[in-house]
Image: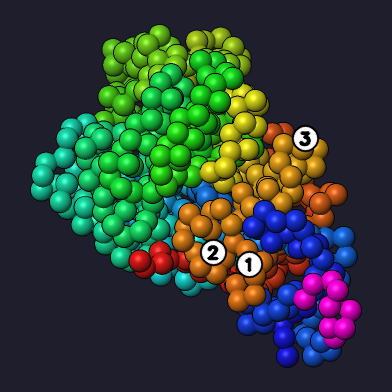
């Protein structure tokens, strides 16, 4: 007796091929039969536990979020509708070089403080792991959707070197290599970096190259948030391409945008650089989110020298008037490396979340608007907020360009990633709306991609990057990670004004053959597990 028959679906199978009508049979978590329209009329399966009439709906593989920040949300929030309702069936965690494994007791507390703005401090999470394998085992107790993990290079550096701006010693580099290797052996799919975040940004290229050699030898990939998305962005992209080539390591460029005024209209230059690398044989992919504003923490804008030593040292520097004056000069005049080499424009920095509820009246305002209300300079407001909120403030940066977003999403190496931060009272709507926005706005309304192209970008391409042999396509024998959506109505409910509204037009989502979204509602199923690196 089969678990499920999905009848009369328009199958967009993830390969990029044209849609076709078929009945799809699922049993024991896998697709066991696909009966195309001509044969489906005689395909009677009265023994199926359930049948769904999918007339008018598209059946596609589940979407793979190549850049997610759900590292703690998956543990604290069994519902996880933010992603499940979008049709996401797999997320890639451990992004931007900072996450919660591998750690020791000291490093865990430091990392928790450093990325409070991304994930909260985690008071409601039992941190009963220290290794990558331990974290993946924790996910295997049951989560809403599947998850893969990248070894975070910044966390590894914090564990071995600390938060100082200096080169690693040979002994320290050896230990970092071992930690990266252990993480990959325990199931990580690659390594991430956050090269505008401390302490990862303190690593020189030679150090990163040596770590990437380890990653490549295990069949993993390197996923850098590189050194600039503003001034010097093209040079930063080229640096990563050259580094990955030297290390013989596959490369996946995180949230590959071209932001700030200095990069308006310059996406074709980036794509030409990537095409040259691909034509020369590079193993290269990238992800983007379908919005123009970015999202990070307010503390991330600070210059790297001000962040050396970790969060408590940052707070001490902000409290000192002379040092705070130096920080202000770097932010407003020089253009700090934390702000991608571009002098900060406070009117583009919107406060999206605070750790201290007493500061909630600032959420939704730009730093300049908040300063005007108080009759002070934007820097004074930002400094006070950083100190009172203990670096836990998240922000939206309204610095993107629509023409760049559209050009990059058309590229042959493109995949989708939400970069969604789920904390804060007014988060970026990409956390709840990325994938339906691709399908609704950029396919149906704007025609930037065809439906078949877009689904391939969100399914089979990321599955290939992750080296998953049985996900990312609607194929017999593949895992039943599937989405049924209405191409006429699919779209994000989330807006900048109401960022936690759920999508429309996605009535069914299955993870390993079990419904996590059924008739448009979240079930109580927790079928997700860790998806570990496929050995070479």
Mark 2 nearby-residue class (10 Å; few <14, some 14–19, many ≥20): many
Counting residues from the N terminus, which is met first, the one under dot 2 or under dot 1?
Answer: 2
Side (left or right) of 99 relative to 483: left
The residue depicted at 28 percent of the width and 45 percent of the height is 247
Tag 2 secondary structure = strand
Structural distance between the alpha carbons of marks 3 and 2 = 31 Å
Q: Between residue 80 and residue 258, name the one nearer to us.
A: 258
Q: Is residue 115 visible?
A: no
Task: Residue 480 in the image: state x and y as whole percent.
Answer: 64, 71
Q: Can residue 289 be found in the magenta stretch?
A: no
Helix, strand or loop under label 3: loop
Occupied quadrant, residue 101: bottom left
Circle 1: element type: loop
Q: Quadrant of the C terminus?
A: bottom left
Point out the frontmost of discs 3 and 2: 3
Considering only order in the chain, which callout, 2 or 3, is on the residue closer to the N terminus? 2
Pointers 2 and 1 in contact (C-beta within 8 Å): yes
Q: Which residues are magenta?
A: 35-44
Question: Residue tagged by mark 2?
Answer: 146
The spot of residue 232 in percent (x, y) is 40, 21
Residue 36: within the magenta? yes
* Residue designated by label 3: 446
Q: Who is closer to the viewer here, 44 or 298?
A: 44
| Real-space Cα separation, disc 2 to disc 1, in angstroms | 9 Å
Number of labels in the image equals 3
Residue 114 numbered mark, or none:
none
Q: Residue at x 63, y 41 (%)?
A: 430
The tag on residue 481 is 1
């Amino acid at each position: 007796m089969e678990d499920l028959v999905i009848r009369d679906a328009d199958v967009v199978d993830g390969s990029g091929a044209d849609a076709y009508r078929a009945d799809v049979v699922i049993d024991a978590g896998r697709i066991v039969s696909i009966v195309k329209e001509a044969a489906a009329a005689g395909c009677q399966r009265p023994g199926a536990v359930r049948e769904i009439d999918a007339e008018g709906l598209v059946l596609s593989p589940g979407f793979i979020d190549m850049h997610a920040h759900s590292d703690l949300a998956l543990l604290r929030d069994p519902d996880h509708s933010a992603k499940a309702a979008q049709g996401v069936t797999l997320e890639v965690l451990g992004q931007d070089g900072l996450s919660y494994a591998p750690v020791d007791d000291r490093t865990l507390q430091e990392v928790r403080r450093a990325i409070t703005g991304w994930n909260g401090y985690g008071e409601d999470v039992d941190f009963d792991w220290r290794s990558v394998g331990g974290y993946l085992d924790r996910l295997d107790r049951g989560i809403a959707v599947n998850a893969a993990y990248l070894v975070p290079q910044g966390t590894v550096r914090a564990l071995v070197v600390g938060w100082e701006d200096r080169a690693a010693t040979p002994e320290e580099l050896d230990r970092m290599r071992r930690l990266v290797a252990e993480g990959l052996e325990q199931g990580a799919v690659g390594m991430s970096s956050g090269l505008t975040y401390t302490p990862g940004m303190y690593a020189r290229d030679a150090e990163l190259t040596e770590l990437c050699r380890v990653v490549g030898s295990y069949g993993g990939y390197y996923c850098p948030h590189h050194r600039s998305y503003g001034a010097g962005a093209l040079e930063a992209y080229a640096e990563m391409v050259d580094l990955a080539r030297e290390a013989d390591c596959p490369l996946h460029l995180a949230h590959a945008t071209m932001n700030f005024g200095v990069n308006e209209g310059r996406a074709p230059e980036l794509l030409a650089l990537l095409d040259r690398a691909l034509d020369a044989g590079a193993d290269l992919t990238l992800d983007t989110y379908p919005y123009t504003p970015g999202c990070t923490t307010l503390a991330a804008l600070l210059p790297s020298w001000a962040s050396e030593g970790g969060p408590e040292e940052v707070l001490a520097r902000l409290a000192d008037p002379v040092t705070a004056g130096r920080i202000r000069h770097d932010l407003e005049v020089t253009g700090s490396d934390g702000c991608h080499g571009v002098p900060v424009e406070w009117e583009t920095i919107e406060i999206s979340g605070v750790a201290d509820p007493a500061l909630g009246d600032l959420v939704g305002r730009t730093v300049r608007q908040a300063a005007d209300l108080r009759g002070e300079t934007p820097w004074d407001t930002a400094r006070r907020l950083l100190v009172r909120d203990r670096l836990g403030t998240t922000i939206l940066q309204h610095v993107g360009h629509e023409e760049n977003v559209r050009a990059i999403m058309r590229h042959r190496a493109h995949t989708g990633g939400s970069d969604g931060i789920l904390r804060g009272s007014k988060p970026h709507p990409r956390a709840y709306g990325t994938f339906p926005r691709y399908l609704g706005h950029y396919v149906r309304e704007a025609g930037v991609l065809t439906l078949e192209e877009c689904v391939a970008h969100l399914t089979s391409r990321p599955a290939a990057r992750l080296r998953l042999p049985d996900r990312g396509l609607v194929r017999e024998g593949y895992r039943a990670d599937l989405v049924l959506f209405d191409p006429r109505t699919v779209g994000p409910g989330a807006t900048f004004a109401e960022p936690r509204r759920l999508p429309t037009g996605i009535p069914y989502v299955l993870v390993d053959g079990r419904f996590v979204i059924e008739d448009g509602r979240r079930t109580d199923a927790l079928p997700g597990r860790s998806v570990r690196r496929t050995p070479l």
